[in-house]
Image (spheres, coloured by chain):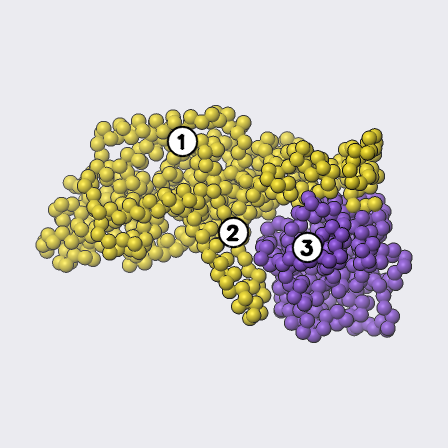
Chain colours: A purple, B yellow
Amino acid sequence: MTRRKFLKAATAGVALGLVGGPSISFGKEEYDLAVISGEPVAATKKALEAMGGISRFVRKGQQVVLKPNMSFSRTPEFATTTHPLVVATVAHACIEAGAPQVLVLDHTLQRAELCLERAGIHEACKNIPKVYVLALQERKFFREIKIPQGKILERIEVVKEILDGHILINIPVAKSHSATGVSLGMKGLMGLIWDRESFHSQYNINQAIADLGTVIKPVLTILDATRALVSGGPGGPGEVMKPNLIIAGTDPVAVDSYGVSIVPWYGQNFKGRQVEHLLAAYQKGLGKIDIDQLKVFREKV
Amino acid sequence: MRTIIQGLSLLLFSALFVLATYKLPNWLPADIYLGLDPLLGMNAVFAAREIISRALWSLVTIGATLAVGRFFCAYVCPMGASIDFLDFLFFRKKKRLGLKSETSLRRSKYFLLVIFIVAALTGLSLAFLMDPMSLLTRFYTFFIYPLALTMINLLLDVLRPVFGALGWVTLSHQHYFQSVYYMTAITLLIFGGIIVLNRFVPRFWCRYLCPLGALLSLISPLGVFKRRVSEDCNECLKCQKTCPMGAVTEDPRGTRLPECIQCRTCAKVCPQDAITFPASISLGGEYSKVDFSRRGFLYSLAGGLGVGFLAMQTPFAFKQSKHPLIRPPGAIPETEFLRTCIRCGECMKSCLTNTLQPSLWESGFSGLWTPKLEPRLAPCDQNCNVCGKVCPTQAIRSLSLEEKTHAKVGTAVLRKEMCLVWAQNKICLICDEICPYNAIVFRPVEGYRRPVVVASKCNGCGFCEQRCPVQGESAIAVVPNGEIRLKEGSYIKESKKLELEFKPDPGDDKFIIEESGFKVEEKKEKGTLPTEKPQPKKPKGFL
């Protein structure tokens, strides 16, 4: 699929998704996770509904930061970046819920203009008013904060926007990672810090991710597992599987832990507990790790 | 009228310069000014000893000069325009110092021209030193462009709070990537020198030094438009004093035709309106001969040959394959590359990542200002192929993205004693994470998964070298070994022949567990491994 074709389809998809479907009420029951199988737009919309609707997280007048993965200048089919339609759908929902503006941010690994161009997220969000897709590569856009509960990290420079009272929604893509096993929501938060390299050179990256999780707390994590890069991650190219799933939840560890279970990584099945940085996050008390104890809403759309 | 045309030309030159960057559309010849320069064209064709199709554009300039005269200097040349403009700015009201030995100075440009052409014939590309188009493009690249970026970013920083308050989100997060280069100061000094020379006489450079002007002046007396002074002349000598080229002779009715650039300043200042530029086909005349002595010609001939010899006197001149420079992808074989490259700096300007940098003395005199990759600074991005597109002499070939991917510039080599994983058992995978070609794989060695470069998948892009978190020198570095330099033909075919594989497609990454194992036996003396236990059965990060 060429990029152009893809984006056309993407735009059409968003439009369709936004028009269609009466909303379904789920009563009072609250789920830990929503696991929706289906096309990106429909599944994302359904997942938001299942989690109580976007208005549960975004109140009128609240600024929103979305953190997809758009760190690599690869097109969506490589599964190294979040599906543009998933991001666009969430962004649109936030605007509809009354957010005055939505910032879609990532600290990209490759040159910003290339990442923005190739990942397709910029294009998909282009026509949604008040949604800004920004790749930040300059230190001036970051500010240092303390990590009081950090085991190894004491301070860290993070994107200013997430400190200024904005609501953070994490929209990672599901992929393998040659240092941390998988790169899902918890690992994806590394895209909001300035000095990513120190996680590799100075610290134990797995503990550092858990420490980071004590200060960066997304209100919602929407794991894009429409595709999963099950090997060759995080940069690809690698084997791409198509679980066709959107996994949403407020508990970042639970979402990731479930994400670990959906496909074999590098040809092997793992549990969340077997992923070192998830276990560390769980031990920090950041969330639940055993998925059989979670209340999961499953549906196919 | 003339100043407007001149100004527009400078503007066009600048606009094309700005546009010469990533996503340059294929139809836009951003290098057209350099292509129109017959001196650069001749220089490259002579030195490379073959016809370079893009250099043929310069025939347009030759033809127009033959027909019209040396108008190029006054109307088209952006260097002339810059000199005129800066002259107006700085020296307009100053009394010029003047010069005594005008005639002999005037000759020097011809001597320089001969030196450059002879040097080119010996296979040394040298005209870049003084060719105005090359010089100005270089000045723009190494000075104007970084300066402009700094100013713009400064302005953005100052206004950032305002943009923020106004809710202009994109502007308040705007920042332009700051390109930096070696040799900025040197380039500025050279250009500054050229401007300062105007303190003596206006257009000092054009009158006495410019080899392109010299070349054009050789044929300009054939042009149709010539200065004519009518009977009304009262010999006030105003024209003689104001002529920026010193083309008016002692007797104000005479014109040194090779020097006249048809700017018509004389006609404008003449109180008698006695000066016109009618079309006439008269040839020759007293002042149409080029000032040139036989002795001077012989000297400059010898000079050219001498420089040609001197330039080869670097230890690696004949052993270029053993030289550690990494050239841009698509650069033709080194000997031809050095002969063809005109050092305009356009490739370095257009380089998306700023990895292309000018060489100083790395490959001697003959390699001055030639582009090299500096992977520790920045990588060569797999999605960009602009350097070849803008190269006016195709010393860097214009390649499609796929061809460019196969134009291997070198191979990454891992220095184990510096690598955090090999030497310190740390969990680092940055080189693997960023490698666009999956050329770095992890293999279990002594119970740990350690990075290894698969040379046949590495095209030398340098992402690994740039990203390596080791301080100072990188623990993984690109060396020229394995580079593919083709003068013609397909890089894809060549790399197939060499059994190389640069796959941007998914699906070629089956190596991780099954093949590369984790079946390796555990290391026996476990105690020496400091932090974690070896986990031979599982990939990194899983417990």
Q: Amino acid at mark 3?
A: Arg
Q: Which image quarter: residue B58? A: top left
Same chain, labels 2 and 1 = yes
**Separation of marks 2 and 3 at Cα, in angstroms:** 28 Å
Q: Nearer the viewer, residue A213 or B223?
A: A213
**Secondary structure type for disc 2:** loop
**Which chain contains the residue that carries disc 2?**
B
Residue A88 screen position, x and y as percent: 69, 63
Q: Give the percent coordinates (x, y) of residue A97.
A: 71, 72
What chain does badge 1 belong to? B
Mark 2 sits on what residue?
B178
Q: Quadrant of residue B183?
A: top left
Few, some or many C-alpha atoms within 10 Å of disc 2 (few <14, some 14-19, many ≥20)?
Answer: some
The residue beneath circle 3 is A155
Q: Is residue B519 above or below residue B265?
A: above
Is residue A37 visible to the viewer in this orientation of the structure?
A: no
